[in-house]
Image: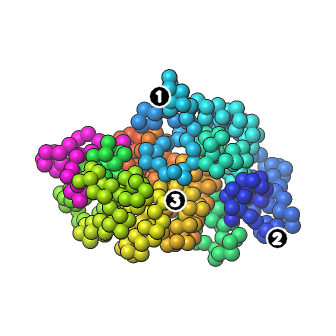
Amino acid sequence: MRWFASLPGNAAARLGLALPVDSRHALEYVHGFRVSGSTGSAVPMAARGVHLATIAHVHALEVLDSRGRPTVEVEIVCDDGARGRAILPSGASTGAAEACELRDGDPQRYDGLGVQRACRNVEEKIAPAIVGRNPAEQFALDAVLLELDDTPQKTALGANAILGVSLAAAHAAAASQGVPLYRHLHRLWSQARTRATQQQGRPAPSVPPPAMPTPMTNMISGGLHAGGNLDFQDYLVSPRGAPDYATGLEWIVRIYNRLGRLLSEAGYEGRLVGDEGGYGPRLANNRQAVEFVVRAIEAAGLMPGEQVTICLDVAATHFFDGQHYRLAATGDRSLSSDDMIDELESLVDVFPIDSIEDGLAEDDWEGWQRLTARLGSRVRLVGDDLFTTNPRRIAQGVERHAANAALIKVNQIGTLTETFAAMDTALAGGMTCVVSARSGETEDDTIADLAVATAADQIKIGSIVRSERLAKYNRLLRIERELRTPAGK
């Protein structure tokens, strides 16, 4: 799996990339380099009289996310005036294998959560290495970033610094070319998949054109997203039967409003929301939460299971003590892995559930194998903490037959190139991909373009009542209109 003929060696090794010299002559990098000759040398197009935009300035700024916590914003300015900006999200439910989010640790500023060190790393350590480069050379630029920080989880510079630059470069490249971001990302994605298959000797993939994902949307929040009111983290709906994205979004809004009314009428909290916008009622148990969601679907005049399905984000790692799953919020029960599987199967048997995320803990691999054998043919079993958007962990899941879908969060891994590698590994292993936001989000809407560009099966953004979520939902509405509009209109 090798996307660029002259990636630095250490970065290539970290990504597990290798490309035989004799196959390089067949590859052409369309964003600035042509790979030619038996040595695989990269010949800049600029040397052939074609002007390419180059990075002129790189700026970083400490801004705030939706929880009022500092995060990194990166802006790249090109010599042709094009600009690209990215703001990084932050998670509450984080896996142990995630890339490092560098914080200042100064208790006198933002309770130690400041990101000034990460911002300085962008401007003082990363910028000098990328100024003068073509931002469209995404894979080469990401390789430079990985050379600058060769730690396994990006602890030297911080994944929040590295990813900010990686994503801002993609935005700048799209702006310089005058194309929507999803078009630029689709081009990169097609190249990434083609070169991965060439290296691994797999049949050439059929890379679908940009396509709208089906949203899965938070209705009720629990776990770390809502103060531990319920054990499971999210209870979501997905408008699987909707004829298009816009219709599905209207269904979601209708269900959400009916749910709030039902909760209030039953004497539960039907107005206050959690980190991602889902209602946060203190219900008796997890089953009652699912029952309320089913009733809300019906109250909206829709058919549970046929038009709208239910998805669960269990986030089991966060109530696993190393031996047992402790359901403290609903009766203080202590379950083994097999008991937990029985619990999930009992819900699938009764309710129209078609997706369960992190049904078991991140290192309970044997449990995941049994869960997949039991329920993998009936529902989507999504690995989040299990995989952390890491190609190696996803490959391990494929080998062990653990999970059948991968959640994709760009800040779990740290560069766009590695995100593509994770998605390719999942798809090559027969899994589906769900592009996801985080609990701490911003107005940045990059993941909407990423989901469309890669034709991801689903996108998980959060609920529909907070503007950092709506930025993504509304971006998808605009993209859908563009995809339907004939060129030139």
Residue at the extreme right: 38
Front-most of 447 and 89? Answer: 89
Q: Which residues are magenta?
A: 261-289
What number is the disc on residue 95?
Answer: none
Q: Residue at x 73, y 41 (%)?
A: 130
N-terminal of the pair, mark 1 or mark 3, is 1
Q: Label 3 is placed on what type of residue?
A: Phe
Q: Label 2 is placed on what type of residue?
A: Asp
> Label 3: few (<14), some or many (≥20) within 10 Å?
many
Q: Secondary structure at mark 1?
A: helix
Location of mark 2 (residue): 22
> Is residue 213 rendered to the left or right of residue 279?
right
**Residue 277 can be seen, yes or no:** no
N-terminal of the pair, mark 3 or mark 2, is 2
- The alpha-carbon separation of the residues under discs 1 and 3 comes to 30 Å
- The alpha-carbon separation of the residues under discs 1 and 2 comes to 55 Å
Q: Secondary structure at mark 2?
A: helix
Here the colouring is rainbow
Location of mark 3 (residue): 387
Position of 389 relative to 113 (above/below): below
Position of 12 relative to 141 (above/below): below
Location of mark 1 (residue): 111
N-terminal of the pair, mark 1 or mark 2, is 2
Q: Label 1 is placed on what type of residue?
A: Asp
Residue 445, horizontal then vertical, whole percent? 48, 45
